[in-house]
Image (cartoon, rainbow, N blue to C red):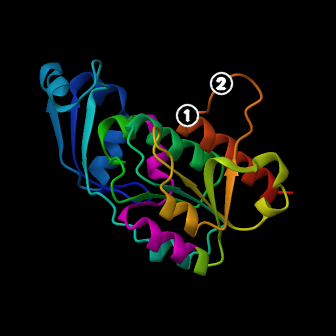
Amino acid sequence: MLASTTHVIRELFVTERTADAEVDVMRAAAARDVPVVVVDERVARSLGDTVHPQGMVAVVDLPRTRLDDVVRRHPRLVVVLVDAADPGNAGSVIRTADAAGADAVVFTRGSTDPYAGKCVRATAGSLFHLPVVTGVNAVTSLELLREAGLRVLATTTAGEPLNEMDHALREPTAWVFGNEAHGLPADITQVADREVSVPIHGRAESLNLAAAAAVCLYASARAQRK
C-alpha cells in the first residue's frame, strides 16, 4: 500500500504518458505493492471530473479522524466550519488553515463533503497535511474544544473588531465560520466565548468565507508566534 501521512492508496490508474513522466511515483507504488493499471486517455477522462485530467487517479481509503483524537494532541489553532456549503470555499479554508499552521479543520454535520472533487482540488494538497474531522454536532464539538482549553471565537458581522483582539488571540483558539449566505445560527454564537468581526474599511458588504478565514487565521498565527 502507498501511503501519505494519513491516507492509504489502494490502487492507481495512470496513462502511459503519465507513467513515463512520474517514474518516482511508479517506483514507490511498486515498492509498496500498490496495483497500477495503465489506461488510455479516454478512460482517464472518464475516471476524473476535470476537463483536463492529469493522467493519474488513485483509489484512497478515507481517513476517519475523531475530534477526540484532535483534542488529545493539545491543539492551539482549530477551524470549525458550520453549514459551509461551497466546496471551493471549504477547500480554500483547508489550504489556508494548513498554511497558517492550524492543527485541524472540523466540518460539522450539514457542511459540504471535504472529499468531494472540487473541494479536494481547492485544498491543493493540504487535505493530506492536517486532520479533517467530519459529520460532528456543532454545539457538542464547540463545548468539547472549550473543555480542552481553546477559546471559541465565532465570526459575525456584529462582533468585536478583530484588530482589537491581539492579546486574546495568543491563547489556543477555535475559530468558527458559518454558512456563506446565512452566517452562524444563534445557538452557535451563544456557545462561543466571543463574537468577532473582520473590519470592512471600504464599501464591500462583507468578505467571503475563504477570505474571512484567511484574515482570522493569520491574525491568530501572528499573535501566537510573538
Residue type beneath disc 1 = Asn
Horizontal relation, residue 223 to residue 41: left or right? right
Q: Which quadrant of the figure contains the N terminus?
A: bottom left
Q: Which quadrant of the figure contains the C terminus?
A: bottom right
Q: How many residues crowd mark 1 within 10 Å: few (<14), some (14–19), many (20+)?
A: few
Residue range (magenta): 122-145
Tell me where residue 89 appears, x and y as whole percent: 46, 37
Which residue lies under the disc numbered 1? 208
State the SS at label 2.
loop
Of 92 and 83, nearer the camera is 83
Tell me where residue 29 appears, x and y as whole percent: 29, 48
Residue at point 12%, 26% (across, down): 43
Q: CA distance from mark 1 to mark 2?
A: 11 Å
| Residue 204 image label | 2
Q: How many residues crowd mark 2 within 10 Å: few (<14), some (14–19), many (20+)?
A: few
Tell me where residue 98 appears, x and y as whole percent: 58, 49
Q: Are marks 1 and 2 in contact (CB under 8 Å)?
A: no
User: Quadrant of the rendered structure where residue 190 is?
Assistant: bottom right
14 over 157 or under it: above or below: above
